[in-house]
Amino acid sequence: MHPPIHGQGVKNYYQSARYLPGGFMFGFLSIRSKVLAMLLICGIGCLVAASLVAMRSGTTTLKSSIFDQLTTLRTAKAAQVVNWFQDVSDDFSDISQDASTIAGIQAFSAAYLRAGVGASATPTPELDAYYKDKFLPSFAMLVDAPLVPRGFLPASPAALRLQAAYVTRNANPVGTEGVSREDTGQPADSGLAAYDDAVARFQPFFRRAVETHALEDILLVDTRSGTIVYTVAKRTDLGASLKSGSLSTSGAARAFSRVIEGGGVPGHTVLEDFSAYIPAGLRPSAFIAAPVFSDGNLVGVVIGVLSVKQINALMTNDRHWEEAGLGRTGEVYLVGVNELLMRSPSRFLIQDPAAYFKALEATGVSSETLARIRHFDSPIMAQKVSTEATREGQKGRSDTQIVADYRGVSTLSSWGPVAVQGLHWIVVAQQDEAEALAPVDGLRHSILVVAALAAVILTAISVALASVFTRPIQAVLAGVNTLAAGDESVRIPVKGRDEFADLARAFNAMANEIAERSARIEQKTVEYEQLLRNFYPDLIADRIRNGEGAFSEHVRNVCVVVLIIEGFEGLVRGGSGETLERVNAVVGDLDELCTAGGLEKIRTIGETYMAACGLSTPRLDAAQRGLAFVEQVSGALDRLSRVYEVELSVRAGVALGDVEVGIVGRHRMLYDVWGATMLEARRIVFDAEPGTVRVTEAVFQQLSVREGFEPKAEITLFDDTPVATWQRPAAPAPAAESR
């Protein structure tokens, strides 16, 4: 693109254009605009047409695929439900014909009659309190009318006696699916001896049947009286009549009546749909019943209270919806044909109760219904699903469509009827349209991206043609910008022999000169920084390199080592060249040992050598490193003594603590370390004996190995501060080294 042109430059720009053949620039700009517009219109028009076709085809294909998947899943779930009920029916048929069941119902019927002998027709205070304080409050909120115990207490003295002995001691809350765990420990009652014996004999069999056959409870009903003479769960239906009283209209009573009215066929079972069951605190319960025969005579009816856990697990795929191909919003549920009430849980109640109830409120579900769902934590027999899908299923039709579900959300749904031994339900498989058709949104996005890229490409081609004549200038401009950004390696290819080639050669010559100057400056900078680091620790060198003047910094936990080289004066005798060689050898060896040991040299003054550990890099083992440095120095001086035939040894002072480090001076900056720790190290070194190292208490306490140290008299600093010290040989004893 051309750079902006202002003022007189505009006039010069257009005057220069006259020298182009035929005023080509103006004509080209006009044609470029027209070609660019035509290319964009044609290209985008074709893309829009192709996009519409692709989106329509993709949406149709995707919908068909999802509908097929939902139909397959719906059919599979319906088959699973039918098979499960068939399995339960077969198992319950076996239970009804088992010898323990036949003997048990006879034993409990006889024991029930004996329990009524001499029993009071008035409920005990404990039983009356149980109904008043535990049983009735469990569902009082679900009933508008006031509840009193006498409306639910059994009329039979035997029933009152049994409930006082068993029901009042049931540890499981009313309305739960748990069965009684306490069948013993009843008060001594001679009238219940026969019943207690029957419980001890048959309870294990019936409990095992409940636990292994997807049941919540088993009821044994006497055929003649219609009385429930035994239950596993020991709820308020124990001793209740299915022919009169509060349970005469229950699902259990209907199942009992259907068995009796059918005349009874051994092993034949009947299913009774979900309905509110008073002993379960009005929690909806479904029942399965079968006759019990003994020697060809109908002696009773066994009724099973079906557990909804297995149905729930089947319909929710054991709460693994995504593994079943239902994504984040798909679900399969059952609805009753007659009243369109749910027979299985809602995925959204399980995963996000707050959003679920909010959606139901938005669709106009009554507060009473919401309270019932919250109370039982289940929509079974509480939530009505009156949607296009369920209404069509109510007519016995199967179909797949996009419909609004019970939350008012648009879904892809597949529905159809399912019948199981007289139960008529509707199975619905659905997934939110937003999720199901999300790939269409992805396709739409991809098409828009392709269209945008196509427009960019068309525009780029047009702009490229316009840039043919300005490319050499743009190359020079790009080179200048790159050079200004700091890339001195940039060079412009020289093509041809025209003025543009001369300009490129001039630029390259200038870039070469700049690169050479920068290289020289960089070399000087490296040399300066190296010199700086030779004089100062890295911490100080970095701050000086960044332009700081005099400064100080407080550093914690620094180990300061002050060495005095005994016999140093013997090195400086002789010629100046020989003295320099010897001093350089000693100081050089100490510098290498200092760096290798993780210490930093502070300075050297004559025979005194100062170093520190922990200045630039914090060290937890600063004291150990300082003593190791002293040991290595002692060894190095011993070696140099033999080389130069001069008796050299070291005495050292080592202190640990906080220091101040910095640069002082205005005209000639001097690096220094000061503070109490430095004063301690410099003071105690003078009291150290030759060939020894003396340490302060802070150093001594940090050492893990303290062998060889001997306590010394306290040393007083310049401000009369006493300092406790310990001393040992600078070089470790041979025995310590062997260890």
Image (tube, rainbow, N blue to C red):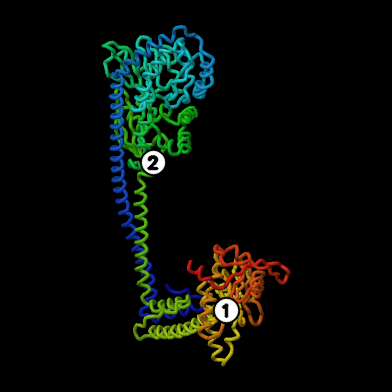
Q: Earlier in the sequence, mark 1 or mark 2?
A: 2
Q: What's the residue at 48%, 84% (across, down)? A: 520
For the view shown, which residue lies furthest in the right direction? 720
In this view, 207 is above or below 248: below
Amino acid identity at mark 2: Thr
Q: Is residue 551 visible?
A: no
Q: Residues within 10 Å of mark 2 (few under 14, many from 20)?
A: some
- Which is more foreground, mark 1 or mark 2? 1
CB-based contact (under 8 Å), mark 1 and mark 2: no
Q: Is residue 647 visible?
A: yes
**For the residue labelled by badge 2, is the local secondary structure a helix, a strand or a loop?**
loop
Q: In this orientation, which residue lies closer to the viewer: 256 or 108?
A: 108
Q: Position of residue 676 (x, y in %)?
A: 67, 69
Q: In which quarter of the image is residue 222?
A: top left
For the view shown, which residue lies furthest in the front direction? 735
Q: What's the residue at 59%, 90% (across, down)? A: 573
Number of marks in the rendered image:
2
Q: Position of residue 645 (x, y in %)?
A: 53, 86
Q: Name the residue under label 1.
A: 649
**For the residue labelled by badge 1, is the local secondary structure a helix, a strand or a loop?**
strand
Q: Name the residue under label 2.
A: 329
Quadrant, the N terminus: bottom left
